[in-house]
């Protein structure tokens, strides 16, 4: 998923199987439904927790706005943001809000995989290898998982802000509910979904192309399509490109989630157009790409970590299932 919780790129690679191995698709790589959920949940949690400091840098850079003009954007870079946090808040400042992501990432990724598998099975009964069905299933999964992660993403980003007025996750949730209402937790939901749609498309297209290219460079690996190295490398390339392309929408999402807090602008409406117009008026078009470097720095290794963890988890469950099948066979014999 791609919120910066974004889970949209964790879907298992089913559409590249050949007719010879089509049976595998029907059994979902030999795994039970709940095993995909756990694998995805573990992968998403490890990814976001490992890359959290970079996500904090991105949030700080994107939340800057109003009154500073374009010159303010030019002088706030990754190194400066990083040095400022360490100097004023210490290393702990890089991890403020990690509890919210710890609460939201696992369930969101579990929802993503469960919805993906359900819709994929429903749409693909007649043609299990149709990439269009996988794409539609991925969109459905994104809509559902974003509904789960968005509230905690709002809490996370508000806690990540410099001089955040909230004491912690519980305090932030309580105050937002009392002062702004439940709707504040979903002010950016539409933007998040719209952002994750192209993110998913770019990510999967790039991932498959990079994966194919890696196989052609080293023909001996063609039979080892599930190599963790291949998944990690292709995932890193795909994650970086998808992140760069969707940065403007991510800036809009951050602005909506942090509006009215720590000097961030408050918008008259939650429309994407209104937010973009405000950003461009105050910071110029460069304001729409604030934080693109840390966003790429986040998604490249995050995708590599996620794919590697996901495949490792799948392998564990596959070995577990094979062992159970072997034991059951021995008992029946």
Image (tube, grey):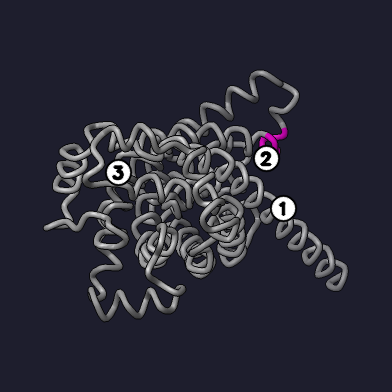
At a point 56% along the width and 63% down the height, the residue shown is 37
At a point 46% along the width and 35% down the height, the residue shown is 293
Note whether 260 is above or below 60 in the view shown: below
- Element under label 1? helix
Q: Is label 1 in contact with label 3 (beta carbons under 8 Å)? A: no
Query: Does the segment drawn in magenta span residue 206?
Result: no
The magenta stretch spans which residues? 224-229
User: Looking at the rendering, which quadrant does residue 286 occupy?
Assistant: top left
Main SS, magenta residues: loop
- From mark 2 to mark 1, how far is it between C-alphas? 10 Å
- Element under label 2? loop
Name the foreground residue: 170 vs 31: 170
Query: Does the segment drawn in magenta span residue 227?
Result: yes
Residue 58, percent from left and from top: 44, 46
Note whether 206 is above or below 318 in the view shown: above
Q: Which residue is mark 2?
A: 226
Q: Which residue is mark 1?
A: 315
Q: Which residue is mark 3?
A: 249
Badge 2, how many Cα within 10 Å: few under 14, some, many 20+?
A: some
User: Looking at the rendering, which quadrant does residue 203 occupy?
Assistant: top left
């Amino acid at each position: 998923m791609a919120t910066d919780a974004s889970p949209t790129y964790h879907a298992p690679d089913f559409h590249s199987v050949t007719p010879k191995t089509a049976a595998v698709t029907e059994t979902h790589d030999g795994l039970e439904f709940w095993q995909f959920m756990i694998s995805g949940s573990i992968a998403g949690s490890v990814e976001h927790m490992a890359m959290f400091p970079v996500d904090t840098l991105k949030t700080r850079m994107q939340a800057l706005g109003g009154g500073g003009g374009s010159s303010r954007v030019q002088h706030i870079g990754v190194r400066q943001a990083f040095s400022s946090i360490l100097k004023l808040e210490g290393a702990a400042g890089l991890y403020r809000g990690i509890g919210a992501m710890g609460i939201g990432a696992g369930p969101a990724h579990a929802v993503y995989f469960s919805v993906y598998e359900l819709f994929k099975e429903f749409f693909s009964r007649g043609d299990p290898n149709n990439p269009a069905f996988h794409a539609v299933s991925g969109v459905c999964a994104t809509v559902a998982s974003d509904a789960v992660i968005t509230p905690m993403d709002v809490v996370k980003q508000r806690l990540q802000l410099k001089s955040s007025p909230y004491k912690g996750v519980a305090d932030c949730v309580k105050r937002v509910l009392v002062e702004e209402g439940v709707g504040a937790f979903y002010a950016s939901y539409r933007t998040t979904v719209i952002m994750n749609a192209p993110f998913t498309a770019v990510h999967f297209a790039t991932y498959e192309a990079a994966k194919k290219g890696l196989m052609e460079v080293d023909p001996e690996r063609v039979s080892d399509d599930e190599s963790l190295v291949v998944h990690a490398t292709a995932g890193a390339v795909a994650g970086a490109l998808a992140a760069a392309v969707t940065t403007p929408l991510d800036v809009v999402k951050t602005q909506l989630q942090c509006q009215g807090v720590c000097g961030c602008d408050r918008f008259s409406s939650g429309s994407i157009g209104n937010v973009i117009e405000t950003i461009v008026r105050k910071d110029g078009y460069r304001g729409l790409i604030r934080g693109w470097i840390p966003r790429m720095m986040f998604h490249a290794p995050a995708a590599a970590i996620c794919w590697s963890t996901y495949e490792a988890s799948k392998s564990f469950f596959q070995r577990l299932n094979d062992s159970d099948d072997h034991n059951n066979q021995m008992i029946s014999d």
